[in-house]
Image: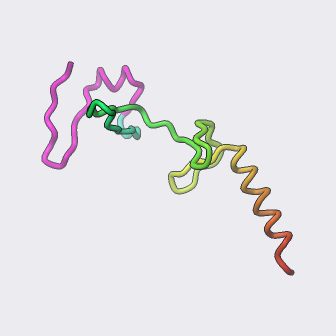
Amino acid sequence: MEYKRITSKGGVNIPVKLRRSMGIEPRDAIELEVNDRNELVIRAYQARCIYCGSEEIHLKKNGKGVCRACADQLVDEYVKQKRKEPA
């Protein structure tokens, strides 16, 4: 077990050995969560589709991901809407 202090700015350094074992490189994004036992859980961030939660990201815009199925569905809905609009 590692013992670390929180910095005055609220940060904490994750030791290299732990980062490597988790596949986390410098400047990678991480997810932080408090579980039901009031423990802080740290995991490597995996981008997910903002609509269905899939990890298979096809498009990214402003840090948000969309999978191919949801992107196709959005395009289909957009095309249908455009066809209904008067010219």
Q: Residue at x 61, y 41 (%)?
A: 57
Q: Residue at x 29, y 20 (%)?
A: 17
Which quadrant holds residue 32?
Answer: top left
Secondary structure mostly seen in magenta is loop
Q: Nearer the viewer, residue 35 or 77?
A: 35
Query: What percent of the width, then of the height, locates residue 21?
Result: 37, 20
Which quadrant holds residue 3?
Answer: top left
> Colour scheme in the image?
rainbow
Report whether 24 appears left or right of 87. left
Q: Quadrant of the N terminus?
A: top left
Query: What percent of the width, then of the height, locates residue 71?
Result: 70, 50
In this view, which residue lies farthest toward the front?
Answer: 36
Q: Nearer the viewer, residue 35 or 53?
A: 35
Report whether 7 appears left or right of 38. left
Which quadrant holds residue 74?
Answer: bottom right
Report whether 70 appears left or right of 76. left
